[in-house]
């Protein structure tokens, strides 16, 4: 079974201003192509071609640029969010009617990585599986501890959530339409021992500011 993938692209990108005032953050370029195109091409290379992208701020620019995804070897559907977006949890919940696999994958639209997406689990023993990475300079305290393949909110060493996860539809069973974050759902599931994880030590960048975008651009261009 191939996972359906949702790319989160509805954020306003406040930390990326002024660049994101006129260009949605996922369309900002590094290495000669938009961040979201790097992701789509990477997903397609690993056999994950059925995508849902949510958008809000300047969202029509995303759908106009990417179209149906065919030129990237993918098929793209869109979930538009009015009024500035629904946060991560609300955005995923709204898009569930467009997602026909259980579990399904979600990835942040503002990261760059060479993670081999085809190694993600297509079945879960629980409610979620998160990919963790070494703590970047801007997030030294990390997010979770990982022990024997399970996530914990306490303990050491701590690692950072990469923005790559696989989720069971049951994680959202009690949710209602509207704006809400994903984190409380994950924290509850972690407390119940229902979240597995892995530590990825390859290349990963959180491209959250103009400086980090410029750094990635230089890296990809071999400067």
Image: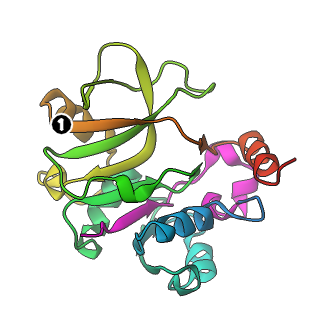
Quarter of the image for the N terminus: give it: bottom left
Q: Which residues are magenta?
A: 1-28
Residue 189, image x, y percentages: 18, 36
Residue 139, image x, y percentages: 55, 25
> Looking at the picture, does residue 32 appear above or below residue 12?
below
Query: Is 14 covered by the magenta stretch?
Result: yes
Query: Is 99 covered by the magenta stretch?
Result: no
Instruction: Name the residue located 33 percent from the left edge and 42 percent from the top edge.
Output: 130
Residue 183, image x, y percentages: 32, 38
* Left or right of residue 58, residue 166 in this image: left
Instruction: Name the residue located 38 percent from the left edge and 59 percent from the top edge.
Output: 118
Instruction: Name the residue located 27 percent from the left edge and 71 percent from the top edge.
Output: 99
Residue 30, image x, y percentages: 74, 57
The residue furthest right is 223
Asked which secondary structure carries label 1, the reply is helix
> How many marks overall?
1
> Looking at the picture, does residue 170 appear above or below residue 15?
below
> Looking at the picture, does residue 180 appear above or below residue 196?
below
Circle 1 crowding by C-alpha within 10 Å: few under 14, some 14–19, many from 20: some
* Left or right of residue 212, residue 197 in this image: left
Q: Which of the 4 quarters of the picture holds residue 12?
A: bottom right
Instruction: Name the residue located 45 percent from the left edge and 69 percent from the top edge.
Output: 53
Residue for badge 1: 189
């Amino acid at each position: 079974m191939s996972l359906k993938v949702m790319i989160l692209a509805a954020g306003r990108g406040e930390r990326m201003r002024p660049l994101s005032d006129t260009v949605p953050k996922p369309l900002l370029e590094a290495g000669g192509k938009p961040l979201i195109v790097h992701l789509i091409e990477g997903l397609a290379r690993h056999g994950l071609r059925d995508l849902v992208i949510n958008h809000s701020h300047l969202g029509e620019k995303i759908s106009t640029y990417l179209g149906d995804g065919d030129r990237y070897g993918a098929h793209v559907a869109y979930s538009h969010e009015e009024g500035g977006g629904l946060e991560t949890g609300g955005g995923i919940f709204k898009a569930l009617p467009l997602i026909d696999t259980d579990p399904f994958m979600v990835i942040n639209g503002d990261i760059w990585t060479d993670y081999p997406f085809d190694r993600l689990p297509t079945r879960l023993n629980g409610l979620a599986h998160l990919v963790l990475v070494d703590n970047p300079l801007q997030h030294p305290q990390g997010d979770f501890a990982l022990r024997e393949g399970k996530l914990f909110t306490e303990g050491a060493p701590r690692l950072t959530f990469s923005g790559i996860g696989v989720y069971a539809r049951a994680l959202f069973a009690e949710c209602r339409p509207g704006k809400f974050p994903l984190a409380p759902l994950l924290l509850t599931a972690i407390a119940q021992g229902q979240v597995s994880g892995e530590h990825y030590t390859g290349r990963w960048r959180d491209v959250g500011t103009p400086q980090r975008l410029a750094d990635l651009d230089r890296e990809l261009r071999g400067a």
